[in-house]
Structure formats: C-alpha cells, structure tokens
Amino acid sequence: MSSADISNAQKVLRMASIIDDQANWSGGSDILVQTGDIVDRGAYALDIYKMMQRLRSEASAEGGKVVSILGNHEVMNAIGDWRYVTQDDIKVFGGVKKRQEDLCKEGWLGAEWLANYSVTALVPLSPYPSSPTLSFTHGSLRPSYASLTPYPDAINKLGHSLLTKALTPPLAPPYPPNPYSGLPKGHTREEAELYAEGGPLWWRGLAEKGEKQVCQWAEELKAKTGARRFIGGHTPNFEHIVSRCNGSVIIIDTGISSAYGGVLSALEIVYTLTPLDDHTHGHDGHRQDPFMALPNTTIDASVEAPASFKDEDQTSSGGLKGRYLEREEIYAIYEKRNKWIALEERVVVL
C-alpha cells in the first residue's frame, strides 16, 4: 500500500462510525469484519495490521469484535510468494530477514494471523441463538468445493493447518529472487485444494459468472452453509459495490487502496426486531446497527448489540420471546451519498 492507504482505511472506518478522529474504536459493541489482502499494496501494510490489532483489543473492551479474514495475498506471503512485495515494504519491516522473522509463527504478525485470522467467517446479525448469519470470504465460496461443510469449521481448520506449516521455520526463501517453492512440505491434498484456483481464497465465480448461474449457486450455498448472504472481495469494481441476486451475493471490493484508485465505500446492514404482540417479552425494539463493507482490503461489518441482550434475566433468545418483525436494510455507503441495495422483512418467533 502507498502512504495514502492507512489514510483511506481510516476514512472508511470513520464512514462506518467504527473509529473516531484519533483512530480509536468508537463502534461500541459493533463487529468489524476485515476481508484480507492488506499486504502487497506497498509500504504501509504494517501500519494497517497494527491498527487492526489495536482495534481488536479496543473493541473487545467495549463488547465489540474484530473478525479478520485471510486473503490470498496473506497466504502468498506465508508460502514465500513475494512477487507483489515492494522494496519499500521490506524496508519498513527492517529487511528480508526481519520480515521473515515477523511472519514466522513465533513472530508478531505470524502469531497474529494464526490466532485471529481465518479463511472464512459466519457472522450472526444479532446475539440471539437463532439469528440469521452472513458469510464472509475473501474470494467466493464454490458450492461444489469438497471441504465446504461443515461450514465454516472445515475450511478454517484447513486454512489454519496450511498456514501453520507455511509459517514454521525455516520459511521458504522469498520468490523472487529465489525459485518458487510452492506450498510447504507436508501439505495435504485438501490443503492444496484450499489454495487452488477453485478454493475460497482465489475463486471469483460469484463475482464473475452470469446472474442466473450465480443465483443458483447462492441458493445451493444457503442450503449447505445456513448463511443468508455471501459477502466477499477479491474482484474489484472501482466505481461501486456490486449486489447480485437481490443481495444474496455482495462483492464489496471497490479498490480503496491508492494503488487502484477506486471509490471509498462501505456496506451497511441495519437489522431491527420490532415486537408484534402486546405480550411480547423483551423491550420495545432491537436494532443491530450497520454492517459496513469496506472495499479492496477490508470489509467492516458492524453490529450494535442492544443493552437488553446483556440483561441478567435474558432468555435463551437473548431476552426476547414472542413474535417480532425482522427488518434487514442494506445500503452501500460512499463519501458523498448512500445507495439502497435491499430491504427484507419477515415475521419471526423467538
């Protein structure tokens, strides 16, 4: 990333009401989801990783959460594929040797990846147990992918295993100038399939194929994973967030890195539960504030959990019982305007 990228990342986080003017967490109990490829955009990836690490701690202290997704470029760096690493990036780390030390499993960044980053995530829209969920992946989930289920555990187990092998010293010598080493020694067939073109790190099917095919895949994925929507990046549209199949698939990469020069954007999902019965147990209404999708390197999904979900007398449904109107509003947020994407309402019984 260039020097502008930490600034762009912070601008989008402020658009999402996740950080304040001092770049400290201001999202309360929101959830921030970052979808990978922080690295390989220039010299300032280190600053963004450290900012995300700090925000993770600050969010946790306020009841919020930061969910981090591995992009294909994180894994490329782990296995020694440094084709997109700039000399400025290497200098920021303190040289090739120091960069490898930081990336290994005992190094601060390698340890951070292993502890807090996953290939995919299933994020609930609200704290109650039967809450609808959203799927986040850097690339696209393929319905026929052999290790899709049980979702997301099967994918994330493979991702963690592959990453551990790649980050165990001695690390592969960087390519270039050295020959490409490929996947780490001892990798399994399933780990190779995870990293292959049809795996969730690289596949672009939900972004690139025709609408009819994508909508068919989305329905298959819903049945197999239980997720309501599938949100990812990897395939940039430099002008706007792309919604497909009435919001079942949302591609949020608009190239916010100055290396690409795309528009700054965020995806906001506002989730609300409104009681329908006079005898409904709970409070007047429950609003899950914005899910924000940050293009290119980050997707920010923020959910504000109402205080009622933390009440001591809460039921197994998070303090809610009875019939509720569930409302899900989805917006693309840009610097000067917001654009409505989808609205869904349904009656749910908790």
Image (tube, grey):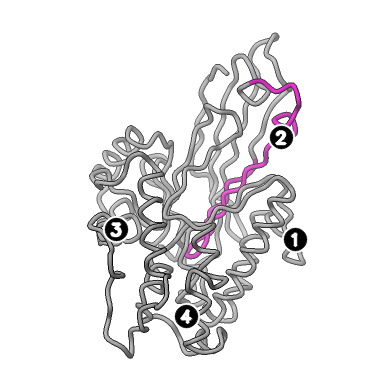
Q: Is residue 27 above or below residue 19?
A: above
Element at badge 4?
Answer: helix
Q: Residue at x 62, y 31 (%)?
A: 272
**Secondary structure beneath label 2:** loop
The residue that appears at 53% across and 42% down in the rendered structure is: 330
Residue denoted by label 1: 20
Q: Is residue 223 magenta?
A: no
- Disc 3 is placed on an element classified as helix
Question: Which three-letter amino acid code belongs to the residue tagged 1?
Answer: Asp
In the rendered structure, the answer to whether residue 15 lies left or right of residue 204 reads right
Assess disc 3: are there few (<14), some (14-19) or many (≥20) residues with their C-alpha within 10 Å of its C-alpha: many
Query: Which residue type does callout 3 highlight?
Result: Glu
Q: Earlier in the sequence, mark 4 or mark 3?
A: 4
Magenta stretch encompasses residue 291:
yes
Query: From mark 2 to mark 3, how far is it between C-alphas?
Result: 40 Å
Mark 2 / mark 4, whichever is N-terminal: 4
The residue labelled by disc 2 is: 306
Q: Amino acid at mark 2?
A: Pro
Q: CA distance from mark 1 to mark 4?
A: 33 Å
Residue 113, image x, y percentages: 50, 63
Q: Which residues are magenta?
A: 289-315
x, y percent for residue 235: 37, 62
The residue at 51%/84% (across/down) is 89
Q: CA distance from mark 4 to mark 3?
A: 22 Å
Residue flagged by tag 4: what amino acid is it?
A: Gln
Q: Say which residue label 3 marks.
A: 191
Residue 280 % position (x, y):
67, 13
Mark nearer the N terminus (2 vs 3): 3
Provide the major secondary structure of the magenta segment: loop
Q: Which residue is mark 4?
A: 100
Q: Which is more foreground, mark 2 or mark 3?
A: 3
- In the picture, measured across the screen, residue 222 lies left or right of residue 331, that is left
